[in-house]
Image: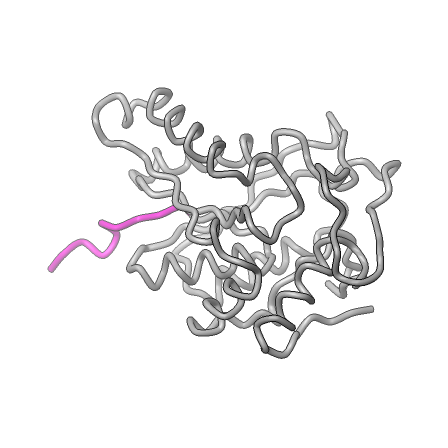
Amino acid sequence: MSDPTSKRAVVLVSGGLDSATCLAMARADGYVCYALSFDYGQRHRAELAAAQRVAEALGALAYKTVRLDLRGIGGSALTDDAIAVPEGAGEEVAEGIPVTYVPARNTVFLSIALGWAEVLDAHQIFIGVNAVDYSGYPDCRPEFIEAFERTANLATKAGVEGRPFHIRTPLIDLSKAEIIRAGAALGVDYGLTVSCYQADDAGRACGVCDSCRLRRAGFRAAGIDDPTRYR
């Protein structure tokens, strides 16, 4: 009998719908998944509770939350209460890099994920970045992912010894509607997820931030009922 942990993957799970879909895809591909979240000083903790719910519901073998203090550098509406989260009407999201961009966040997150992956001897790291329906973050682009993968294999003992790491981004070329349809087909319960940048303690969404508007438009385009709880 083969070792059931021979196909391991670390999956970044934020509590939102993209990372939930990414975890479901990794599981469907036969990976034994180790889910990783970050308590980095974000505006609310509802997404961390959602991340744990998602990890448990989608069968992750282990779930870990790593604490970081990105409030120590600030520079984002998600880590500095003095910077307001942009709000708007309709479904259009402003062009350019918004103030909800957290400086170097995915670089930091992937670095921690890489360290855990090396400890676990897991050579696949899944991250739910998307370069189609997204908020303009530079660390969600294919160029960044490719560059980080090269760095990962230069910077680690495993990489240098010929056991390379691969950064998997199954959502990167999908629209939000396509992501939702794919997750629904895999049985993802999106009612467990929280995407809002400024959700309340109960996980209820504001309905007007960029993330809420992209999420709502995605469900509408997918033709699937939106299970989001709005306050």
Q: Is residue 55 above or below residue 192?
A: above
Q: Which residue is found at the position 28% from the left and 26% from the top?
A: 159
Q: How is the image coloured?
A: one colour
Q: Which residue is found at the position 57% from the left and 72% from the top?
A: 222
* Picture quarter with the C terminus: bottom right
All told, the count of numbered labels is 0
25 with respect to 164 (left or right) = right
Q: Position of residue 36 (x, y in %)?
A: 50, 46
Rendering quarter of residue 117:
top left
User: Magenta part of the protein: which range?
Assistant: 1-10
Q: Which residue is found at the position 66% from the left and 62% from the top?
A: 215
Chief SS of the magenta region: loop
Nearest the camera: 100 or 47?
100
Q: Is residue 42 above or below residue 24?
A: above
Q: Position of residue 41 (x, y in %)?
A: 71, 39
95 with respect to 231 (left or right) = left
> Is residue 4 within the magenta segment?
yes
Q: Position of residue 207 (x, y in %)?
A: 79, 63
Q: Position of residue 168 (x, y in %)?
A: 39, 45
> Is residue 175 within the magenta segment?
no
Q: Which residue is found at the position 11% from the left and 60% from the top?
A: 1
Nearest the camera: 102 or 202?
102
